[in-house]
Image: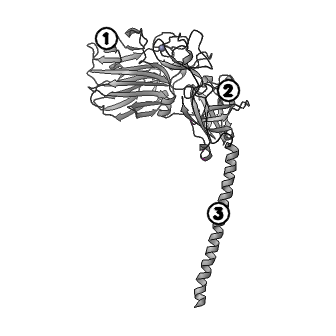
Amino acid sequence: MAGVDLLPGNQSTHIRQSRLRWQFVRRATVLVVGCGILLATWRRFGVQGIVFPVRIASGSMAETLVGPHWLVTCAHCHFQFSSGVDHPPADTGATCPNCGFSHNRLAPNELRPGDRVVIDRWTYLWRAPSRYDLVALRSPDGQGDWAVKRILGLPGETVAIREGDVYINDQPLRKSWPLLAEMAVTIHDDRHRPTDATADSLHWQPGHAASGWHCTADGYNYASSADFHSTRVATHAADWDWLVYRHQSGLPPPTISDVDALWLDNDPYNQSLSRPLHRIHDVLLSFQVRNPDQRPIAVALTTNGHEFLIAWRPDLRQWELTESSEFNPASTNESSGQQNARVLYDWPPGENRVTCQVAYCDHQVLLIVNGQILIKQTIGPSPPTHLRQPCAVRIGASRGSLHVGAIRLARDIYYTPAPTVESRSDSVEVLGPAQYLVLGDNSPASVDGREWGPVSMGEIIGRVVRWQR
Ligand SMILES: [Zn+2]
């Protein structure tokens, strides 16, 4: 009997002792590991802490993060733009990118300090940097400076820059819509018209003398004219009455020209930076429509050797994207592929304004209506440069009446060849297993991975989070 009683008691004592021993080992391990982490954290972050604020000192990440700059309000059209102190405007004044007025005097009260950001050294303890992260790093030029850049290439990838776009493993890198919208550089904003503007001097003009489009104080009205009315459903470019954008390259120097004017990668931040300019092809159009009678509306976009028609058809209650060689003899279906997309959409009833955004960026076409992405279509390769027509943007109507306003045009970032090391232009970087390629958003004025080559994790100090401008 006793033996029978004794056996379980012995077992439970043995298990209790084993548990106590295990608890001791566990606590000791936690203590040792904890002290180790504390020591490592102190050695790595003790001087500045894990999260600390800094101020941006240069314009290499403008306009995402700006250094010391003048915040200029154009005397002619009241468009507001930043002009960096790194490449200050001429003595005669800053040139407005919107209207081309070049005598905007700089007032001392317009001088602003660089953006405040927070450097977060905590996040990368737990995860590796992601593409498009803004990071602070020790400048690899050996000067001991810190720099803020954006991560474009990840470990193991092959990165190339061609015609302003970044390619990863030979495929174009396509930014998300929020990122495209955040990084866009304004080309023209119709809400800011010069004080002495007349209907004939505006950038947006009716496509022909008998057009139903007419300029108003806050945009453009369309009413079917006697000479142009279609009873057909408009499916081809010729079926539409167009409001045409006349590009005027305001910077530098301002030149009024026709629709064939070159669309270039100039920008107001680097006013006096002398450099070769590049033809751009990634454009973003945004406008508001008042369309109470739910009439057809369209955008025609010619760029990079493609011609797209993006139209809302009331008969089918759908948005359509078509690309056809009909619009552009140079673009054959063999070279560009026929790109089509359809999505059902009910136009909101009544007088409500609908915001439409159409973009061709990073070899994709996007349609965003009231903030919702309706079409996101990947576009094939472009025909050779000599076959590409100049950029052109038009807004079309075909029946009834409607109103468009708040028309804005912007472009995507154009990644230029390295500004000081021409031999690295269009170069290809092959990244090792723990290497990143970092670039500045203000590509022509940035010293970055195009010159430095890849950077290692050890050179990255932390993630950069915007705090305040
Ligand atoms: Zn202006």
Q: How crowded is mark 3: few (under 14 residues within 10 Å), some or many (20 or more)?
A: few
Quadrant of res 461: top right
Number of other residues with Cα within 10 Å of mark 2, as a class: few under 14, some 14 to 19, many 20 or more: some
Is tag 2's residue or tag 1's residue first in the polypeptide sequence? 1
Disc 2 target residue? 424
Question: Residue placed farthest to the right in the image?
Answer: 142
Depth check: 140 or 451 in front?
A: 140
Residue 274, given in percent of the width and then of the height, sits at 62, 15
- How far apart marks 2 and 1 lie (CA) works out to 52 Å
**What's the amino acid at mark 3?**
Arg
Q: In the rendering, at what x and y percent does residue 435 appear?
A: 66, 39
In the image, which residues are magenta?
126-133
Judging by the rendered image, the residue that carries numbered circle 3 is: 26
**SS assignment at label 3:** helix
- Residue 446 or 51: which is nearer the viewer? 51
The chief SS type of the magenta part is: loop
- In this figure, which residue is indicated by the disc labeled 1? 210
x and y percent of residue 320 in the render? Answer: 36, 30
